[in-house]
Amino acid sequence: MITDKIKIDAFNPDQKIISRAADLIKDGELVAFPTETVYGLGADALNAEAVKKIFIAKGRPQDNPLILHVSDIEQVNDLVYTNDIARSLMLNFWPGALTLVMNAKKIIPLQTRGGLNTAAVRMPDNPIALALISRAGIPIAAPSANLSGRPSPTDAESVYNDMAGKINLILDGGSTNYGIESTVIDISDPENIFLLRAGSTGIEELEKFLNVKLKIPGANNLKRSPGTRYRHYAPNIPVYIFDNDSEKIERDYKNAGYLGLNEPDENFKEQIIFNDVQNYAHGLFSAFRKLESDGVKFISIELPPLSGIGLGLTDRIKRAANIS
Ligand code: TXA
Ligand code: MG
């Protein structure tokens, strides 16, 4: 299969390109597209055969459910059982980087929701994504458009590197705004709201809006997001947490890459210093991909503060380092 990568203006998407992409989705094919968080690998969420292609292209475990992307709040009622909290969250945070897990209606194939009774829904804040979903007229199931386990793609080139030959079309809308994925919360029981994945929407903002503390599912809790069971976001070289501390483990830093907010007290082959946490989140996954292709032996990485997007960023870094 030849994979087309087409540039498309994020502010004023070309309707011819959108309709070509929407036709592919309606025909049960895969299209990668930008969202405000990371690139998604989209298929018709209500077509089990189409959704199956996503799992095959990514090499993703079948029990890891997908997010259904909508272009309109009304669309959600066809898919899941909403409640007052769901409606107020959608009105306040959508379009945006907040994914809501609710009880699924039967119309969503089991393939899409990984066999669960719940399903995850979000409305992305990106004009290309919204135009594509609305033109297709169906919810689009889309995980991040990387091979399973690899860093999520934040630009079309990264999608191409992982997906060339496996999908028909990549819509190249430039680099994504946030750089890490959406925050996922389970609101299927409004009395017990769980944080399933920290992400681009800060939990402080959610807790303030909801006026409750989000619960964190324990290791054996059924509410735990299936996706959190797998190693994730990892480059193909080792990642170690770095701290500027005399007690730290000595490593061969001069052949390594460094990522962080502060200058390290060692000499690295290559270092990327971000000037704030937003830029750090924005650049993390592409920095992983750059350092591995530059041939450094390993990556030393500094943890950011645990507030706002820093919580999700910390989660991604720890998973890449395999210590969560
Ligand atoms: O920002 C994002 O969320 C991106 C863009 C493309 O929208 N998508 C994304 O999808 O990150 P994915 O498949 O890489 O991650 C979806 C996460 C996984 O951890 C999955 O287990 C969880 O959402 N999830 C989906 N449906 C769920 C459900 N019914 N119950 C619990 N967790 C669910
Ligand atoms: Mg992913």
Image (tube, rainbow, N blue to C red):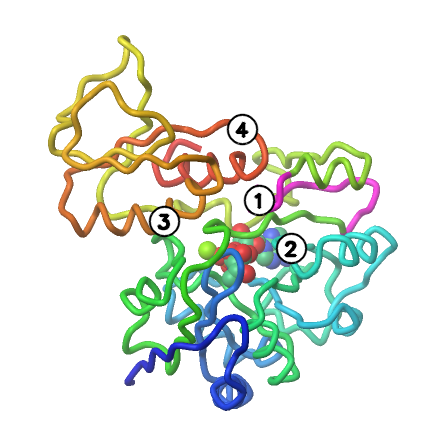
Q: Are marks 2 and 1 in contact (CB under 8 Å)?
A: yes
The region drawn magenta spans: 188-202
* Residue carrying label 1: 197
Specify few, some or many for label 4: CA neighbours under 10 Å numbering under 14, 14-19, or 20 or more. some
**Where does the image place residue 248, in percent across and percent down from the top left?**
27, 14
- Element carrying mark 2: strand
Mark 4 beta carbon near ligand 1 (under 8 Å): no
How many residues crowd mark 2 within 10 Å: few (<14), some (14–19), many (20+)? Answer: many
> Mark 2: is the Cβ under 8 angstroms from ligand 1?
yes
Q: Nearer the viewer, mark 3 or mark 2?
A: 3
Residue 306's disc number: 4
Mark with earlier residue (2, 1)? 2
Q: Nearer the viewer, residue 65 or 270?
A: 270
Q: Are marks 4 and 1 in contact (CB under 8 Å)?
A: no
Which secondary structure dominates the residues rendered in magenta? Answer: loop
* Residue that badge 3 annotates: 285
Distance between the alpha carbons at the discs numbered 3 and 1 = 17 Å
Q: Residue at x 48, y 63 (%)?
A: 62
Query: Rounded to the nearest whole Å, what is the CA distance between mark 2 and mark 1?
Result: 9 Å
